[in-house]
Amino acid sequence: MNADFPILSMMLAVPLAAAMLCLVASAHSARFLALGATLINLLFGIWLWTQYEIGGAQWQFTESADLFGPIGWKLGIDGISLMLIMLSVFLMPICIGASWRAIKERVSEYMAAFLLMEVLMIGVFAAQDLMLFYIFFEAGLIPMYLIIGIWGGTNRIYASYKFFLYTLLGSVLMLIAMIWMIQEASTADIPTLLQYDFSTEAQTWLWLAFFASFAVKMPMWPVHTWLPDAHVQAPTAGSVILAGVLLKMGGYGFLRFSMPMFPDASAQFIWLIFGLSMVAVIYTSLVALVQQDMKKLIAYSSVAHMAIVTVGLFTFNQQGLEGAIIVMLSHGLVSGALFLCVGVIYDRLHTREIDRYGGLSINMPIYATFFLLFTMASIGLPGTSGFVGEFLALTGVYKVSTWAALICTTGIILGAGYMLYLYRRIAFGEQKNIDAAAMEDLDMREFWLLAPIAAAVMWMGIYPESFIAPIRDDVSKIVQRVESATPVLDGKFIANDPSTAQYRTGGEGDSDTIEQEASGNTQ
Amino acid sequence: MTENDLFYTRPELILSFSGLLLLLLAAWRPNLGRQICYISIAPLIAASYYAWIIMTNEAFEFGGDAFFGQYRADGFSSFSKLLIYLASAITLLIAPRFLEKKGVMKAEFPVLILFAAVGMGIMVSAVDLLSLYIGLELNSLAAYVLASFARNDVKSSEAGLKYFILGALASGILLFGISLVYGFTGSTSFLTINSALSGELSMGATFGIVFMLAGMAFKISAAPFHMWTPDVYEGAPTPITAFFASAPKVAATALLVRIVGEAFTNQVDAWQQIIIIVALMSIVVGALGAIGQKSLKRLLAYSSINNIGFILIGLAAASQIGVAALLVYLAIYVAMTLGGFICLMQLEDKDGNMRDNIDDIAGLSKHRPVLAAVFMIFMFSLAGIPPMFGFWGKLQVFQAAVAADLLPLAVIGIVASVIGAFYYLKVIKVMYFDKPVNVIGNINSNMLVWIGGVLALFVSPLGYLTISILSKWSAVAGTFLFVNGG
């Protein structure tokens, strides 16, 4: 494959074509078709990663075609997009595998919906035209609405409506903002818009409009209420893709649009993001603590983790942003895996109620081991992906606001609380339910669904450089862009602070060197 | 009368003479209804050809006037005519099967459609209050008869009567407005009216404008003049409802655009706020009214009210971009609404009776997957959810509104569109999520399947490939209005 190969278009075309074929295929062949297409896309993704030149041009694999009049078919990725596309193509075959037996009705339509979902996810991360981005971003509602509504649980209709209307309401305001931006800057090209300086007043309004969309998608407290419903009702694979990739679109939106395009407004609204995030971390963690439904518990933990992401993003420093992105990737893997773990036992007992299980480590040792690993990764134990992201993000937060860091760290302790409590009730203790005690351990299919995620989680925990290297340059570009607007909060080093004078040995004139040392230490 | 007059009015001439000839044929061969329907497509194609020439040939770059400034053939009228003729032709193709089934297939049916098309052609070409009224009434008269075409059906007769009485009332209001405008400007020609209305607006002329707009709002079934729509749409035979929701909507909207964009361009402030309020009310009323509906026909009627609201947003922009956006929206709207009704026409139970209750399509996706999928495409498209093509129409009108600095209108309008999404989703929910009731049987009508399929492809993401053509010609059409204003 040479450099001119339109790899991104191919990654969109393969699942799209497979989705169309699935619609006319039988259930059995639809399964293999979907698996084949997602595996091909995984290979494309790996090729993309190996060919991505770290430290090269900001936008790579760019394509441009004049297909749709004013909507430019412009694709291209930077490191951040690359990582999120990798996450999508990595999780997709696992989702197909997870639905292999769990979905018995309308299999071909189900597989088609998932493949369309993959097209739209990759499209969101690769679009370089504002309108193209919006179309991909918004179109994702249709397959997800159908996935929740057709193959979901008992209360699926309520959940699907809530999901659709909530997200739509958030997004339409963003559409108006985008229209305004396109007319103001007379271009819809995202790389050009990244350099465009909107007036401070306009930035405020535009930022709020984008915030309405991304905050719902993220989701941030208090507009998170659609998420627990959607997660609980969606089929396992739907929850995986929802938690794994769809929530990341909110974070991606903040990274790609809100921060670099409206730096002044972003700085102005730090208090809002920090405030909402801190409430979210504490509140949703406490809510998670008292859940009886496993999926609901993980859903609330997702909201808490996403709050760490938002708080990390709005620190405007290298560690905070890198940490936030790693948390996004890590959460994509870990929460996806946790939903799969729930799915495994749900398939056997058809209940998500925590009390119906217990002592599973006795009869399902392999399962319990995997579950333990992902629980630890969710808590952020060193050696797992969760630690890297959370540590970096909180370091970034500490540099900006020690109070925010304190509260967010409390959230992580609470996170350990609810996750360990969940694990204890499910895997440890006595086998109080006979049917739960009779469940068989993972079969080969389930093992091979969880094993790749476990490997990726460990890889990201032990050698995170593979994941940080591609995003480093892009993060520093965003940091530079917002630097001028960054306000000084309490976490910043203050030169010649009188209250610390007694600890300083040098004279007044040495303050520069001290400052350099200080900033050198923290970086 | 010069040669030019005859040249520019050629679409209307072709349709009129064909209509008369076919009427004779119908008189002697009354049982040839289906054949005459198909024959009538030919004059529509011929008329479209001349409309296309006027629009695309550079020799007619500035359009042309006929009959001493009564009639104008230009890009704008041609674009609208193409839509009208297309919608009429589709109606002629889909109607025979339905009417025969109902036992009301008469050979007059295609003739009435042709005369309605003549009237609509005159409407969109009218640049004088007289020709405006003649066109409008020619269309309306045909429409009243069409509404009650199923003579043995009480509901259809009721629809015709309601349509007639309320339509006559609206025509009266419009005429009152026309007489006031004529009285205060001294002319019936749009251009003269426009120059007479420059400067301060007198009270009488204001009343005239308001009454004219009220009459037009009735014709396009915009809230708060929409009450007749659900009843008439429900009562009239389905293919005729499809016709009402498409072609006359285009014609009346284009006429409204022509009035405000040519006769009132000096008084934008006087009518803009009316259009804005009517647009927002239509969006909200159309969305809220549809929620409780059990009949799918009534639901689509409310959907058309809702869509007219979005179309009027393009007009509220009072600019050439706005007109172009409005025409793009109309083109997509015609495809969506015809497609929606074509889906409805395929809903027959196992004994061949028509069904249009929303409960009857529960679980339709199980036993009629393709029909359900096509219906879903139309519903998502009407809701304006990308990547369906309906989104492009909405995007265009909102772009025009933002360009005209009408941000509050754009924001309120788009937020209200979320309310509308609710009932479109409900149809999809019933078809896909609910337990199958299995009342809908199979029907064998290749015509409905094919036309529905082609329209579905147009409003599916493939429609985006037509953007360059649509944008080009709608932009050309837009240049003929708001010449001094926007």
Image (cartoon, rainbow, N blue to C red):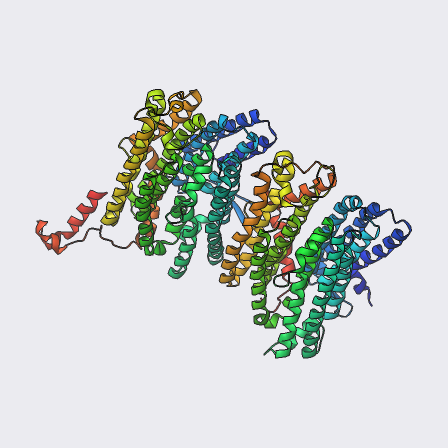
| Image quadrant where residue B2 sits | bottom right
Of residues B383 and A41, the one drawn nearer to the viewer in this rendering? B383
**Image check: B318 left or right of A80?**
right
Q: How far across and down, in percent of the image, does residue A203 sit?
A: 39, 57
| Image quadrant where residue A18 sits | top right
Of residues A94 and B415, the one drawn nearer to the viewer in this rendering? B415
Q: Residue at x 72, y 56 (%)?
A: B81
**Image check: B250 left or right of B393?**
right
Q: How far across and down, in percent of the image, does residue A369 sit?
A: 33, 24
Question: How many labels, in total?
Answer: 0
Q: Is residue A348 above or below residue B224?
A: above
> Taking the image as drawn, is residue B73 in sight?
no
Q: Is residue A154 above or below residue A515?
A: above
Q: How far across and down, in percent of the image, does residue A449 sit?
A: 42, 26
> Taking the image as drawn, is residue B80 in sight?
yes
Q: Residue at x 72, y 49 (%)?
A: B238
Q: Residue furthest right?
A: B28
Of residues A348 and A6, the one drawn nearer to the viewer in this rendering? A348
Of residues A133 and A4, the one drawn nearer to the viewer in this rendering? A133
**Image check: B276 left or right of A404?**
right
Q: How far across and down, in percent of the image, does residue B109 sit?
A: 81, 52
Q: Which quadrant does the C terminus of chain A fall into?
A: top left
